[in-house]
Amino acid sequence: MRHSGPGRRARYCSPACRTRAYRTRSAPTPAADRNAIRERLGWLDARVDMPTLRALVSKLSPAQLVEVRRHLDAVGRAWEAVAEAAPGALRGPAPAVDDGAQLALTPPTAATVTAPPVTESDRAVWPASPPRKPVPAPSTAVRKVIGGLTPTTEQAAVIDACRSGDNAVITAGAGTGKTSTLRMAATLMKGRGLYVAFNRAIAADARRAFPKTVQCSTAHSLAFRAVGHAYKHRLDGPRLPARDVAARLGIDSGLALGDGVLVDPTQLARLTMETVDRYCRTADEQIGPQHAPDVHGVEDQAHAFLAGRLAEWATAAWADLRDVDGKLRFAHDHYLKMWALSRPDLRADYVLFDEAQDADPLIASVLLAQSCQLIAVGDECQAIYGWRGAVDTIAQWPAKYRLALTQSWRFGQLIADEANKWLAVLDARLRLTGNPGLRSSVGPVERPRAILCRTNAEALRQAMIALDAGLKPGLVGGATAIRRMAEAAQALQAGKGTDHPELFMFKSWGEVQQYVRDDAGGRDLAVFVRLVDEHGPEDLITAAYRLADERTAPLVISTAHKAKGREWDTVTIADDFREPPCDKDGFRQPVRRDEAMLAYVSVSRAKARLDRGSLDWIDQPTSGRVRQWSRDRDDEW
């Protein structure tokens, strides 16, 4: 570049301009960069597929060539130092390949699915930043300290995939540090990011850890700012008795379902509001019979009739809920649904979606409708909330990159091996590697820090055992659900009936006992019925009130569902995890998929010692297959 003016100014307008000109003049050409890179690649291990690596160099942009050459020069200087210290220990560099040579390369196939375009932008979180500048491709990952952490090879690959600008799915096994990995990636990513978590505590922790360019929030928080604030006065409204809900919806008489079964208006009102709640967890625009809940003890034909009527009343209830001056009790899921129906534009450059396997169709539909980069992180083998509407977003997420984090930092190899047994049963590609710095064991544990149960009823049984032993255990999630179930049993024993959603169809405790004994659908209530028969509902209610706060309790008791996301030094698995029954030929039937996922979640909560309890049958010969299982309600009882 030349400029007008006498003397030196005839060539350069300033010293800085002169320096830039000299650097440009002395900079290697792209062809020279390619030859230098191929020469440096000659120092690499012979096990590397060198023809493919050299061919990939032909695909790099000039900016990427400069970056790759810079790092390979450093590698080359290191090997030269080794060769000087130990002559003959290393083979010489491979000859450079002329840049003009034609190299055939079949690139790996990776399906890229484009998210649906956004049709409305009336619900903006913030203005989008300008388009991002190109970032290095994943093949140019740099291992360095990021935010005080040094990424592993797996984490570096994830970080580079995040920086590529393309959609990515990250399968993160138990204890593999997914949040730390996302934080490192966000530190290097350009533009404005949005981190979406499922609860406020996780979002608050992320807010303290992530860079300021990333907004950390729950979906409910986003929806509240856009829609929910207009209904804030209704969130604090009084609870309406079921009879008042029935009156407002015009449910003035019971509904006969045959065989002498009559559902009274108050129960119909409760089922109607549950239908609305189920609708709010879907991506459906209209309420229909498919949103009606299952009811114990109702035949299929009668249930279809009931579902149709519930859909009609639920539609009327939804109209009331959408009215800012409506009278029905307004909940957080209601404004979340309204927000999703508005097709919001999140106006972010990228979205980091944590625990994606637990997403319900509603939240998944909002994120998939965005036009920005989407990064879903989770573990499809921990998708244990299907009973409440969650879908396996990990498997369905459109992505160019699908990577995994397999190095667990929570436990040692012995517990990792135990978790891997269940991953094998699930036919998962993921396998965990234990933390080499931790010692772990699998075997009997005399005084565990936590006991994990399959059902609430077993959790109550374990709590009563601990109370009898002089301990004061804590129950994760509290004892409210257990106490209410026991109070319902007490009412049925007195012949008064109950409004409990699990038992309201029964007129007496004897009907519940018969249902559990004769109907396969009642198996999930068997442990609870046995506890009531053995101890009486009064003792169960008393035990529920005697439980301690889990944060200070010497022993924590939890269901597997509530234990997800937690960890304890020593864990014992309770006795209510079911071994699959054998068929008529004596072979064990395939493991239900949801049961295998619960087992995987349970054994991976332990950090130091694990007592497998009723899951020790995994070492017996089995087909290793799982069968799919569809259910509308979790059999936690």
Image: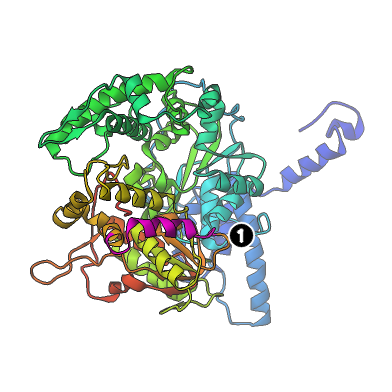
The furthest residue to the front: 494
Q: Could one spot residue 137 in this view of the protein?
A: yes
Residue 332 magenta-drawn?
no
Left/right placement of residue 479 relative to residue 133 reads left
Q: Nearer the viewer, residue 40 or 171?
A: 171
Q: Residue at x 63, y 50 (%)?
A: 66
To which residue does mark 1 refer? 143
Q: Residue furthest right?
A: 7
Q: What are the residue bounds of the magenta stretch?
A: 533-550
Q: Residue at x 27, y 22 (%)?
A: 251
Residue 299 image position (x, y, % from top left): 13, 40
Q: Quadrant of the C terminus?
A: bottom left
Residue 322 location, quadrant: top left
The reply to whether residue 428 is in sight is no
Q: Is residue 121 above or below residue 65?
A: above
Crowding at mark 1 (Cα within 10 Å: few <14, some 14-19, many 20+)? few
Residue 539 on the magenta segment: yes
Q: Which x, y percent locates residue 277?
A: 37, 33
> Percent position (x, y) of residue 549?
54, 58
Between 160 and 319, the one lying in front of the other is 319
